[in-house]
Image: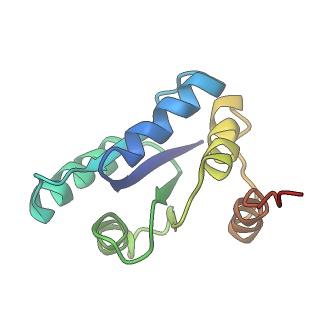
Amino acid sequence: MFGVIITGHGTFAEGMESAVRLLAGENEAIRAVNFMPDQSEEDYRETFSACLESMKEFERILILCDILGGTPFKTAYLLCRDRKQTEIFYGVNLPLVLEICMQVISGSGNIPVPGELAEAGKQSVGYIEKP
């Protein structure tokens, strides 16, 4: 069984979690941790750490971050670099988050390999040319 932590700047995480709930339903294995403008990095680290600790019963935890190099990503990396059961994705979009969360909600217990997930996220980005 695996869990998901969505994190990012502002209400990115909360917005993604809300969209997943709307499209796929509620699930306790999916959590959101916002990094708000009025929050210090230390406060954010404590909040993220508490969320991570609350998910220790999961065999695997996927952390979905908004951008590479930002405070949410750096915090996740520093707190999880020695935890073999965690994997971090960055630059996530709603189709990728939904793909991962649908696996959690379905209870299948398995997810595609990280490289396949990253490719799925890339394939969901496109551009429509006007005639």
Residue placed most toward the observer, 1 or 47: 47
* Residue 103 image-quadrant placement: top right
Vertically, is 68 above or below 5? below
102 and 81: which is toward the camera = 102
Q: Measuring 63% from the left and 37% from the top, which residue is drawn there?
A: 104
Quick check: 6 left or right of 62? left
Visible in this render: residue 115? yes
In the picture, the quarter occupied by the C terminus is: bottom right
Q: Is residue 29 above or below residue 86?
A: above
Which residue lies at the image location 44% right of the left edge and 38% below the top edge? 15
Q: Position of residue 54 (x, y in %)?
A: 31, 41
Q: Point out residue 27 in the picture as x, y percentages from the top left corner.
A: 52, 26
Counting from the top left corner in percent of width and height, residue 65 is at 45, 60
| In this picture, residue 116 sits left or right of residue 73 | right
Q: Quadrant of residue 102?
A: top right
Give the residue furthest to the front.
131
Q: Quadrant of the N terminus?
A: top right
Q: Quadrant of residue 73?
A: bottom left
Q: Which residue corresponds to the image point at 44% horizontal and 74% vertical from the top-left?
A: 68
- With 121 as the anchor, is 45 left or right in this view? left
Q: Is residue 25 above or below residue 73?
A: above
Q: Is residue 115 above or below residue 98?
A: below
